[in-house]
Amino acid sequence: MMGLDRLESLMKFHPFTRLNKLLENVTPGGGNTPFLLSVGEPQFAPPGFVAEIIAAEAGTWGKYPQANGNDAFRQAVKDWTDRRYGLPAGMLQTDQHILPVAGTREALFHIALSAVPEYTGGERPVVLMPNPFYHVYAGAAAAAGAEPYFLPARAETNFLPVIADIPPAILKRTALAYLCSPANPQGTVADLAYLKAWLDLARRHDFVLASDECYAEIYLDAPPPGTLSAARDFGGSLDRLLVFHSLSKRSSGAGLRSGFVAGDAALIRRQAQLVNFGGVAQPYPILAAATALWRDEDHVVANRSRYQHNFALAQEILGPLFGEVRSAGGFFLWLDVGDGEKAAVELWRRAAIKVLPGGYMARPDAAGDNPGQRYIRVALVYEPADMEPVLKRLAAVLADLLAESGHRQAGE
Ligand SMILES: Cc1ncc(COP(=O)(O)O)c(C=O)c1O
């Protein structure tokens, strides 16, 4: 019953299933309206033109969408990508290197199915991923029958996996590696040299590099580099590389289920074929709205400034307890509270605030040490005016918890 076993290992670790179970018998308290800071779902409306375009395109609901979308979408993506990552005009070809996807979650799952062979050098293939990580990477590896290999991404290494620590025997079996920058959950932004080192590794060891860049447009100061720029600096070949981008975070459009992958032509073809068998192609009205979203930067700038505002508030309110809490990219706080599970229960019980225990996004290492266990992940996804009182409530509970557990505070 291999299939069932794989499914079990997928389900057992699903972070939100675990969170629901953790809190099922805990009554949210404090007389407060519940606030869900556990899910990375932006609470802002996408621009008004989205609904208008979808309505105007209603005549195409009757048509089966095509896996590779249409020219207008792929051209908008190419223009955005070329500009954002400084690519020469001839590098990304709209008919070969770009594919619309119905959510990067789905595409990140599909890449494991298309990139992992039955055997690598006669052995079980390995899928590399950071630890902690976005849960879909491990689910996809399990569904593809690969062995997940978790690369520690702890504070000591700026929350990035250390390439030199990957054992040669593991690299030999590696079929796919997931990279995430800005990182969910820690918000770390990898520099271009680091992205280049991964691309170089993927090519030398002949594995696929899946670079998840869905938080690329949400940052504090400088735009995070992308792996496509690394490919440019290596001469422009897209061999072994796929990058993943989404409108869910950039445009607050999680319900649109819209993003794109770009990169290696052979991998793009395989991803498209998988969609033809068991995926969802982008409906034309959604594709038209997505095209307009990739062509508009005003709403992205406005979104980014909301998150920057939220981080400034978080720093003001939580800084006295934790020191620096801002992340270079993305919209999460990653707070070392000593015991993430306990903090999640107490925040729900005392203040009706739901957060995700960091340990639910990570796996224990060989010594049984879970690199996320001490942390909670807090999504700053509401308007600043709504975030401010909630952050104050959060800080009050955490201050009590830290005092109760004798945890040292910043500056002590
Ligand atoms: C790291 C990361 N990658 C991918 C996704 C998937 O986003 P979507 O499927 O909405 O594009 C998420 C969503 O939370 C995420 O955090």
Image (cartoon, rainbow, N blue to C red):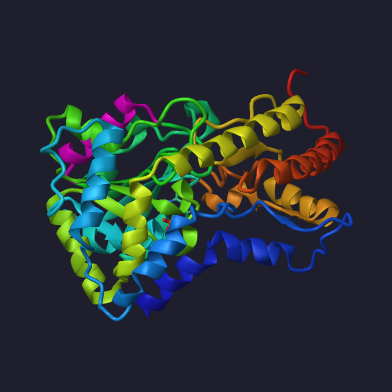
Q: Position of residue 220 (x, y in %)?
A: 52, 29
Is 197 magenta? The answer is yes
Q: Is residue 177 left or right of residue 120?
A: right
Q: Is residue 228 visible?
A: yes
Q: Position of residue 321 (x, y in %)?
A: 76, 29
When asked about the image quadrant of residue 197, the answer is: top left
Q: Is residue 4 above or below residue 151?
A: below
Q: Residue furthest top?
A: 411
Screen quadrant of the N terminus: bottom left
Q: Out of 163 and 193, give the one closest to the viewer.
A: 193
Q: Is residue 223 left or right of residue 68?
A: right
- Is the magenta region chiefly helix, strand or loop? helix
Give the residue drawn at x 84%, y 55%: 32
Q: Position of residue 151 (x, y in %)?
A: 41, 41
Q: Position of residue 46 (x, y in %)?
A: 50, 54
When asked about the image quadrant of residue 83, the answer is: top left
When asked about the image quadrant of residue 73, the answer is: bottom left
Give the residue drawn at x 56%, y 52%: 42
Q: Which residues are magenta?
A: 190-206
Q: Is residue 387 above or below residue 350?
A: above
Give the residue drawn at x 47%, y 28%: 157
State how many labels appear: 0
Q: Is residue 242 above or below residue 270?
A: above
Q: Out of 114 and 187, give the one closest to the viewer.
A: 187
Q: Residue furthest right?
A: 31
Q: Is residue 175 visible?
A: no
Is 69 magenta? The answer is no
